[in-house]
Image (cartoon, rainbow, N blue to C red):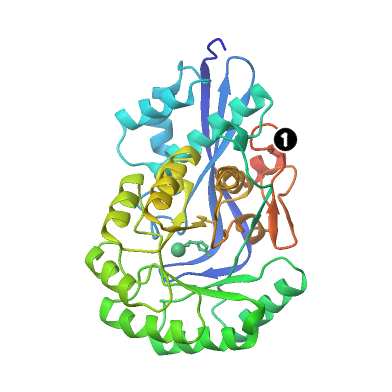
């Protein structure tokens, strides 16, 4: 294939309303902010990508404003004039010139994959080696902050056959209250659902030891990132003691982090996130490390909209085992998105089309309406 030069890259910050507040340990989301990336190529093809985080700078080291600034000022100039058909060379060029910035890189890599898929008439999953399934089971996060409301929401999701895996966000409040909240929800749902918790690094190890025991004893299937990412030795100890499996989330900010966690035995499950690894290709490198180390996989999210969600989904479709399912429900948390057709959720799964690229088209009117001025 002859070269196709990258002509223009645009990053737009978009503020979208959510269906309800979403309470995490470090931040309560009242809306969600996406960075939508458009890569225009000399053959007239445009690739779209998304770089999204949670709570400004509350969750990760990149926020929407810094993502846009670094793309505009640093990363886009490195890609303009490069060959859009050689995604590998483009991403190596970014990695050589820019440390970290995995969120921005993930959005750019997604856009390059989308463009190449459109160019070749292939879905991104096929560019990544080929899908082994068309749908992904999707968990829902119960995060209203209210036990009765959360149970009601879970029952509604079960009735709709939309979700039967539920993740509870805890860690913001007092530990004993959080444990009562989780146990009440598990008791209400029983064997009809898998209940997991995400502590988002909030507990100290001395608290987590007992709390993990209580959660495991009460039928909680998985405990996500109970303690700080910086306490690596503590994660290893907890992973050895906890009766419920420990999943690493914030601990993974790069493929190299994943390797070190695997080598140390710090988790038995990895949350795969394209944003934390630097894109759909990068996240598959983390998946391979996990598989080689006997670590189970879960398809994570940074609560992206449709574009980022499908970029992750195309990568996850290529994995033979996703034992713990995915949480690619970001689009369902938004009242409106910036694409013409919403992703399809049915029978507990997200169904991913076999159309070229990511399979999405930007809705120009909504993009203009929600773009931050
Ligand atoms: C996280 O920490 O996993 C994913 C789902 C959700 O509700 O929050 C995110 C972030
Ligand atoms: Mg998490």
Residue 6 horizontal/vertical position (percent): 51, 19
Q: Quadrant of residue 170?
A: bottom left
Q: What residue is drawn where x is 37% and y is 29%?
A: 94
Q: Nearer the viewer, residue 103 or 18?
A: 103
Image quadrant for the C terminus?
top right
Taking 300 as reference, is 316 above or below it?
above
Q: Quadrant of residue 93?
A: top left
Counting the numbered discs, the total is 1
- Specify whether 205 is left or right of 42: left
Residue 228 horizontal/vertical position (percent): 30, 67
As drawn, which residue projects farthest toward the top?
2
Q: Is mark 1 within 8 Å of ligand 1?
A: no
Q: Nearer the viewer, residue 320 or 90?
A: 320
Q: Which residue is mark 1?
A: 355
Q: Quadrant of residue 322?
A: bottom right
Taking 219 as reference, is 226 above or below it?
above
Residue 346 horizontal/vertical position (percent): 75, 59
Image quadrant for the N terminus?
top right
Q: Nearer the viewer, residue 123 or 330?
A: 123
Q: What residue is drawn where x is 35% and y is 47%?
A: 254
């Amino acid at each position: 294939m002859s070269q196709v030069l990258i002509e223009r890259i645009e990053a737009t910050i978009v503020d979208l309303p959510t269906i309800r507040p979403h309470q995490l340990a470090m931040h309560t989301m009242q809306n969600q902010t996406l960075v939508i990336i458009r890569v225009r190529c000399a053959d007239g093809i445009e690739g779209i990508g998304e770089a999204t985080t949670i709570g400004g700078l509350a969750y990760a080291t990149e926020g929407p404003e810094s993502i846009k600034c670094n793309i505009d000022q640093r990363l886009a100039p490195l890609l303009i004039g490069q060959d859009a058909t050689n995604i590998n060379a483009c991403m190596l060029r970014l990695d050589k010139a820019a440390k970290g910035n995995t969120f921005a890189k993930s959005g750019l890599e997604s856009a390059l994959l989308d463009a190449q898929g459109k160019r070749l008439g292939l879905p991104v999953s096929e560019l990544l080696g080929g899908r082994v399934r068309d749908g992904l089971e999707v968990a829902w996060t119960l995060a209203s902050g209210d036990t009765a409301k959360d149970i009601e929401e879970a029952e509604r999701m079960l009735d709709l056959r939309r979700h039967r895996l539920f993740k509870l966000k805890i860690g913001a409040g007092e530990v004993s209250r959080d444990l009562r909240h989780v146990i009440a929800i598990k008791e209400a749902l029983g064997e009809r659902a898998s209940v997991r918790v995400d502590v988002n690094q909030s507990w100290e190890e001395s608290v987590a030891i007992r709390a993990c025991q209580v959660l495991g004893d009460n039928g909680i299937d998985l405990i996500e990132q109970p303690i700080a990412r910086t306490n690596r030795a503590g994660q290893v100890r907890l992973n050895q003691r906890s009766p419920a499996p420990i999943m690493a989330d914030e601990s993974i900010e790069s493929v190299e982090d994943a390797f070190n966690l695997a080598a140390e035995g710090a988790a038995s499950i990895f949350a795969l996130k394209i944003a934390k690894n630097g894109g759909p290709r990068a996240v598959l490198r983390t998946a391979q490390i996990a598989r080689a180390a006997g670590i189970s996989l879960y398809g994570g999210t940074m609560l992206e909209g449709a574009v980022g969600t499908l970029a992750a989904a195309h990568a996850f479709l290529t994995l033979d085992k996703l034992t713990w399912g995915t949480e690619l429900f970001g689009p369902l948390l938004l009242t409106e998105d910036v694409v013409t057709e919403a992703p399809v959720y049915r029978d507990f799964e997200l169904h991913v089309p076999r159309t070229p690229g990511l399979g999405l088209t930007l809705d120009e009117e909504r993009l203009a309406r929600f773009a931050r001025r």
